[in-house]
Image: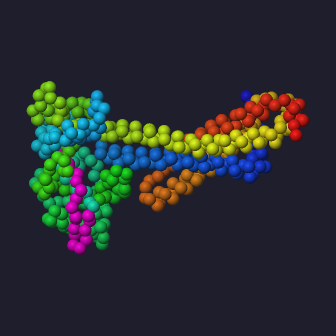
Amino acid sequence: MQILIRIFNESIAIAIRELRVNKLRTILTLLGISIGIFCVISIFASVDSLEKNLRTSINKFGSNVIYITKFPWGLEEGQTEYPWWKYWNRPYAKYDEMQMLQQNVSNAEAVAVSIWMNGPRIEYADRNVKNATINGVSQDYNHIMDLNLLYGRYFTPMESNGGEPKAIIGYEVSKELFPSLTDPVGKQIEVFGERLTVIGVFAKEGKTIVQNTNDDLIMMPYQYLISKVKVDGFQVEPAILVEAQDGVTMDELKDEIRGSMRAERRLRPNQEDNFALNQMSIISGQITQLFGVLDFVAIIIGGFAILVGGFGIANIMFVSVRERTNLIGIKKALGAKNYFILLEFLIEAIILSIIGGIIGLILVFIVVQILSAAVHFDLMLDVRNIMRGIIISAVIGLIAGLWPAITAARLNPVDAIRYK
């Protein structure tokens, strides 16, 4: 073991000395592997950042919540295509059904109904917001979703059930309508041609890839919203949200919901459900499949860049073997074993590749910081991708240096000493 450690240390010293002596050759070789690692890790970092942002956005909707809607969020068991025409004519979820579930589903922690829609122009004095999103919610919505309020409060039961003209507005909406006010609670905004009193402001969340942030949101009581818009189940479709109690599995909750909904809609035993029970795991599974494909594509695209860097290292190592043929012959004549020569060139190739990989990672870090500041999107270079870069660099160095190292180890001492 001590002999192997000494050989390893001596091989590192020789490799570093050779790299210092041949600076131009080293720089050219490092350039190839650095570009390769930069391409690969940049793609991995971008894909991972997108996946993290998307999962963060999706997780906001709750992993223990069942969404009752007309349309399922994915293919159901046994399906090979999405029969949207069948789901189109299903009845949409209703407020009465939400009340029924509150009474009949014992495994539910909370039940609420919600409508999301693109809002009309929101006005205050001479200022307006055109692209806000409206969310009409029933009373228990705040028990299901984590609503972080910067100012004010949530709706009272009387406000929710009575459909009073109250609103909670997003951070960006507040800044646009009330640029000179810190706290706009108590002010009145105009929506649907009527005045709504602001009772709260959501804390700033920032942009997300699926744009489900509360920053551009106008939340109001469900009963108020349906008095102003036509609920048709198509452009305006409600969804019932059911949160599971602690210790209750999603399958148990779905079974109880299914039984209650089928009874409420008077479906016969031989009739299929005319509603969909959706949960975030469906979307999470789709995300996993999507980014699995993207990771594979990243490997293919980045692999070509790495291949170029690998050929560069292999070429340089063959040149190094030719330059040091006489020295190899002398070492072998003095008793150096084949594996000593093999290790010497392998370690040199690996060190060269790892140094190039580290330079590539530094370039990735710089680009990530610049892009994150420029596009206001949270790109990241995490430890996993750093380790990926180093491991890939080491493996490429090992593969690229293997054949030159074997060639050097097999040289005949006499022929090597005579080589000119």
The quadrant in which the C terminus is found is top right
Q: Is residue 196 left or right of residue 382?
A: left
Q: Residue at x 80, y 40 (%)?
A: 322
Q: Is residue 379 left or right of residue 150?
A: right
Kindly tell me whether residue 159 is visible in this rendering: no
Residues drawn in magenta = 110-130
- The spot of residue 297 in percent (x, y) is 48, 41
Number of marks in picture: 0
Check the image and report above or below for 214 versus 384. below
The image quadrant that residue 269 belongs to is top left
- The spot of residue 175 in percent (x, y) is 31, 66
Q: How is the image coloured?
A: rainbow
The quadrant in which the N terminus is found is top right
Q: Viewer-proximal residue, 413 or 89?
A: 89
- Main SS of the magenta segment? strand
- The spot of residue 371 in percent (x, y) is 49, 57
Q: Residue at x 30, y 67 (%)?
A: 176
- The spot of residue 385 in percent (x, y) is 53, 44
Kindly tell me whether residue 203 is visible in this rendering: yes
Check the image and report above or below for 158 versus 297. below
Q: Residue at x 77, y 49 (%)?
A: 22
Q: Is residue 404 left or right of residue 395?
A: right
Q: Is residue 313 left or right of residue 41?
A: right
128 in the magenta segment: yes
356 in the magenta segment: no
Q: Residue at x 21, y 61 (%)?
A: 120
The image quadrant that residue 346 belongs to is top right
